[in-house]
Amino acid sequence: MPESKGMLTEIEKLIRKNVILYFANRPSEEKTLEKVEAFAQKQLDFFIDGMMKQSPEVFRAWRGKNPFIAKAAINKETLEFAIQIVEKEPGKY
């Protein structure tokens, strides 16, 4: 499903923006990798669910399940966030 790759890149950018907005004014102690990944995964689940509802073809291709996980990275010095969407089991959807 090649067209989904471009969409995933756009979703990554949107999730990163939402992560930045959500965590921007929070104390440093709350900016943990686990919390950022959990927030990013909720965002990803929301967007993937929407994609599957909009497209029966996507729903069938992904067998009605989100085949992706959100991975995060935090630069400890600048507290910048990076988000990457990866397949749970590459090549399995």
Image (tube, rainbow, N blue to C red):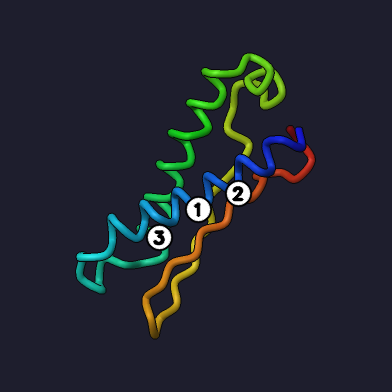
Tell me the crowding category of disc 3: few under 14, some 14 to 19, or many 20 or more residues within 10 angstroms, Cα based.
few
Tell me the crowding category of disc 1: few under 14, some 14 to 19, or many 20 or more residues within 10 angstroms, Cα based.
some
Q: Residue furthest bottom?
A: 77
Mark 3, residue position = 34
Mark 1, residue position = 13
Find numbered disc 2 in the image and state the secondary structure of the residue it sits on.
Answer: helix
Mark 2, residue position = 9
Tell me the crowding category of disc 2: few under 14, some 14 to 19, or many 20 or more residues within 10 angstroms, Cα based.
few
Using residue 56 as the reference point, say whether residue 70 is left or right of it. left
Q: Are marks 2 and 1 in contact (CB under 8 Å)?
A: yes
Q: Amino acid at mark 3?
A: Glu
65 to 87, vertically: above or below: above
Which residue appears at 38% of the width and 81% of the height?
78
56 to 40, vertically: above or below: above
Using residue 28 as the reference point, say whether residue 50 is left or right of it. right
Q: Amino acid at mark 2?
A: Thr
Calculate the distance from the C-alpha at mark 3 to the C-alpha at mark 1: 19 Å
Q: Position of residue 11 (x, y in %)?
A: 52, 44
Camera-side residue of 11 and 76: 11
Which residue appears at 52% of the width and 18% of the height?
53
Calculate the distance from the C-alpha at mark 3 to the C-alpha at mark 2: 22 Å
Find numbered disc 3 in the image and state the secondary structure of the residue it sits on.
Answer: helix
